[in-house]
């Protein structure tokens, strides 16, 4: 089967990150859709005419529109990708669903809040349209390997997820457009932990809250206890002069350290340092591909789903649960 596709929003994640020479490619929806042999990219909509001009030079056979409404009047694609800013997710995703494609791909986070996300879910259910969310690490070979490796490290003891950047963690005035790290970046961290754990994060204890001179939150640590792991921590900083994202998973017999640009796997072995002791040694038997296929894997999952050979690996329901976890943290930050 060949499926037609259209993109709503051809800014960074929709298009231009596909030209970043430092990123593993494809790194945008346009490039990932265009590279899949079962997809024919036919149209794009964006309110920015300059974005459309640049996009059309790359997708010469595609038709451009200055609004999604105009696109849906002319074209009825099988796949619609919504890659607009967070404050337009609900409106554009609902419009996409109501145009009745076979699948909607929604950029993360689902919406500005769980109330908006629930409206998307209700619309999807009413129209019987499946929605998948681009939590890209679910499709990345290194994280998939990490999840498969979990039985090798014994019983889970702790999971620590860390995200450090220069973007503010939270401020009430930024809720209107979602330009704060808790929701913009934190959605990836929460989704990944829940995906690996196969468990929900509930009732956090939030400590280490740091506010700057403008009363904007820049640091926090959220701690959880779950049936599958005795301690889960989420640590975020918005006052770092660098960006890093990673998870440290400690079991009773091994360890997994994985994040942006690294993946290390350790197993319990007889110590080379102390007689009668065991230490953790790097497991050299784990082989990772040179490319993680994080974006192309997401699009392939969409195609496999439409072919009827796979379930969606990142369904709307999971992404809404991620948003609720973030809102629980946010409510504790407000106190």
Image (spheres, rainbow, N blue to C red):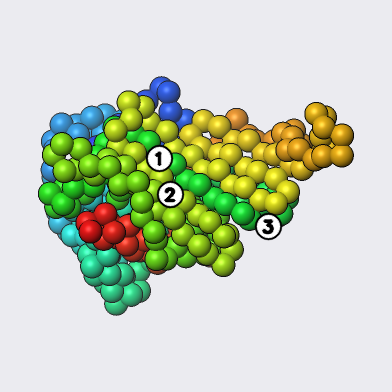
Quadrant for the C terminus, please.
Answer: bottom left
Label 1, label 3: how far apart the Cα atoms are: 25 Å
Q: Name the mark on residue 155.
A: 3
Q: Are marks 3 and 2 in contact (CB under 8 Å)?
A: no
Q: Can you name the residue that lies furthest to the right here?
A: 275
| Whether residue 40 is situated above or below residue 290 in the rendered picture | below
Residue 297 shows in this picture: no
Pointer 1 residue: 163
Q: Give the crowd class for mark 2: few <14, some 14-19, many >=20 residues within 10 Å.
A: many
Q: Residue at x 31, y 53 (%)?
A: 109
Q: Residue at x 80, y 29 (%)?
A: 273
Q: Residue at x 29, y 33 (%)?
A: 239
Q: Are marks 2 and 1 in contact (CB under 8 Å)?
A: yes
Find numbered disc 3 in the image and state the secondary structure of the residue it sits on.
loop
- Left or right side of 196 for 63: left
Pointer 2 residue: 234
Mark 2 or 1, nearer chain start? 1
């Amino acid at each position: 089967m060949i499926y037609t596709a259209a993109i709503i929003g051809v800014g960074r994640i929709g298009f231009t990150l596909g030209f970043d020479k430092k990123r593993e490619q494809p790194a945008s929806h346009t490039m990932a859709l265009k590279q899949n042999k079962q997809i024919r990219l036919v149209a794009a909509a964006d309110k920015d005419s300059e974005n459309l001009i640049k996009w059309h030079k790359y997708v010469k056979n595609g038709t451009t529109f200055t609004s999604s409404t105009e696109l849906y009047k002319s074209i009825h694609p099988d796949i619609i990708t919504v890659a607009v800013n967070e404050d337009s997710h609900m409106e554009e995703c609902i419009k996409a669903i109501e145009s009745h494609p076979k699948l909607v791909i929604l950029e993360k986070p689902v919406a500005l809040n769980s109330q908006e996300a629930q409206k998307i879910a209700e619309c999807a259910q009413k129209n019987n349209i499946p929605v998948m969310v681009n939590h890209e690490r679910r499709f990345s070979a290194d994280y998939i390997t990490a999840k498969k490796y979990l039985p090798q490290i014994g019983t889970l003891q702790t999971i620590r997820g860390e995200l450090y950047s220069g973007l503010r963690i939270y401020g009430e005035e930024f809720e209107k457009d979602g330009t704060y790290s808790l929701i913009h970046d934190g959605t990836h961290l929460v989704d990944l932990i829940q995906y690996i754990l196969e468990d929900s994060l509930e009732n956090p204890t939030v400590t280490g809250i740091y506010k700057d001179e403008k009363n904007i939150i820049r640091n926090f640590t959220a701690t959880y206890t779950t049936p599958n792991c005795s301690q889960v921590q989420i640590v975020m900083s918005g006052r770092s002069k660098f960006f890093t994202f990673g998870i440290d998973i400690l079991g009773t017999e091994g360890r997994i350290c994985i994040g942006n640009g690294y993946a290390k796997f350790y197993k319990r072995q007889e110590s080379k340092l102390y007689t009668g002791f065991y230490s953790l040694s790097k497991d050299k038997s784990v082989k990772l591909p040179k490319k993680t296929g994080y974006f192309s894997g997401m699009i392939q999952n969409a195609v496999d789903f439409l072919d009827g050979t796979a379930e969606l690996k990142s369904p709307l329901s999971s992404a809404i649960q991620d948003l609720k976890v973030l809102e629980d943290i946010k409510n504790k930050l407000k106190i």
